[in-house]
Image (cartoon, helix red, strand yellow):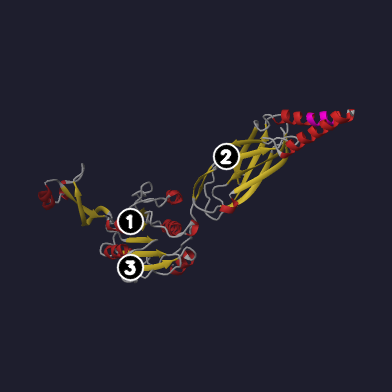
Amino acid sequence: MPTRRFFAFIFLAFILYFLANQTQVGWVYIMVNGLLGIVIASLIYSYGLLNFIEIKRTFDNSGDLTITNLHEDDILEITLEFRNARIKPVLLLSGHEQCPFAPVDDQKQSFFMSLLTKNNPIQLSYHVICDRRGLYTFSDVHLKSHGGFGFLTRQRTLAVPSEIMIYPRYERLKRLRVFENKMLAERESRRIGVGNQVIGTREYRHGDSLRTIHWRSTARTGKLVVKEFSRDDQLTMTVVLDLSTTANVGDGKFSTFETAIRITASLGYYARQKRVPFYITGMAKRWTPPTIALSWWSMLNYLAKVQNDGDVSLSSVLHQLHSMPFIIVLVTNPDEKLIKSLQALRQICSQILAIFITPDGDLPTIVKLKSSVGLTVLCVSPHNWENMLKLYS
C-alpha cells in the first residue's frame, strides 16, 4: 500500500520534470531520474519483505508453551522472538498482538524494531497481569513494514498458536469452624452406599442384591424397586453452584458469579488440606460438574472453564439433592423460591452453610434467614470475601 511519502515523491518528480522540460536544464533531469530510481528500488525491495519472518512465543522465558500453575492476578512475562530466514534485511518492522487474558487496557501489545537481519534474532518481552480465569488462545500477530524508504507499507498476519490456562484465585483456608464441629464430624455421610439407614428407593439394576428389594413399592409399581442405603464413611464436603444465566450480578472479575468461583476454589483448598472428599454440584448446558469427588487439579481445571450458561435455577437444583452431611450453597442472585428451597433443604441435610454473595456485602431484604442449628448464614461481597472467610474461619 503506497504511503504519503510515496505520493509526495511522485508529485515532486512531476514538478521537477515539468521544470526540466521548460528550462531544458540537464541536472534537473538527473534529479528526476534519481527520484524515480529511488521509488522503483523501494518497490523491488519491499516485494515479499515479510514472507520469511518467523515468530516464537514463550512464557516466563522458559521456552515452554504450557504454564501449569498460573492463577488470577499473577504477573506473567511473555516474550516474542523474531527471526528473519532471508538474507534481505527487514527494515522499520512494527506490529502488535492481543493478549487475551490481560486487563482490557493492556490487551493490545505493540512493538517496533528498526532492523531485523538473518543471523540476529530479536526478542521483545512484556509483562501482563492475569486478569481473569479461563482457557485462552492467542490470536495472530500483525506485522507491518514501511520498506527501505517508507514508500510502501507491507502487512502480514502471522499465526503463532499458544494456549494458556488461568486458574481462579483462592484463599488458603486453614480452618472452617462449622465444618470442624465435633458433633457434625461424628455424624455419618449419608450418600448412597451400603450403610444401615434407608434414604430412598430406585429401580432395580443388574447386580443389585435381591435382599434390597422394596417389596411394597415393587407391588405398587409392577417393577422391581430396591432400597438405597446411607454410606457410613468419612465426612464429605459439597458445594452447590448456581450455573443459571441469571446467577450473575455485576460485570467482569468482580461479579457475584466470579466471586463464587473463587470461594469454591478456597473451599476446595481447605478440603484438600483436611483430606476430605470434595464435590461440586450444579446444572448447566455444558458445565454440569462430575458426580465424583474431585482432586485438586481436576477442581481447578473445572473452575477455570465453567460458565453460567444453564437454564435450571438454583432452587430447582436444591430440590433434587439427596441427604448430605455438610453442604455449602453459594447464592449469587437470591429470590423467594430459593429461600424456601434452603428452608426445605434443612430437613434432609445435617449442616448447611449458605453464603450469600451480593455487590455490597449486605443481605437482601427478601432473605429472612438467620443462623440457627443446622444452618449458618454468611454474606460477602466481591471485594471482601477473603477477609470474611478469614474472620469466619
Is residue 110 a member of the stretch shown in magenta? Answer: no
Which badge, 2 or 3, is on the more N-terminal residue? Answer: 2
Q: Position of residue 67 (x, y in %)?
A: 54, 46
Would residue 306 be found to the left or right of residue 37 on screen? left
Magenta highlight range: 31-36
User: Which of the 4 image quadrants contains residue 267?
Assistant: bottom left
How far from the left and from the top, in percent, is residue 157? 60, 36
Given contact means CB atoms under 8 Å apart, are the residues at marks 2 and 3 in contact?
no
Question: Which one is nearer the viewer's eye here, 153 or 35?
Answer: 35
Rendered image: mark on residue 216: none
- In the picture of the structure, the residue carrying the numbered disc 3 is 375
Q: Which mark is residue 140?
A: 2
Marks 2 and 1 sit apart, C-alpha to C-alpha, by 39 Å
Q: Residues within 10 Å of mark 1 (few under 14, many from 20)?
A: some
Q: Is residue 87 visible?
A: no
Q: Is residue 147 left or right of residue 356?
A: right
Which image quarter is the C terminus in? bottom left
- Quadrant hosting residue 48: top right
Separation of residues labelled 2 and 3 (CA atoms): 52 Å
Q: In the rendering, at what x and y percent does residue 373 appear?
A: 31, 70
Q: Can you identify the residue that label 1 sits on?
A: 313
**Amino acid type of the residue that numbered disc 3 sits on in the rendered structure:** Leu
Label 2 amino acid?
Asp
Residue occupying the point 55% across, 38% down: 161
From what the image shows, is residue 83 above or below residue 334?
above
What amino acid type is highlighted by mark number 1? Answer: Ser
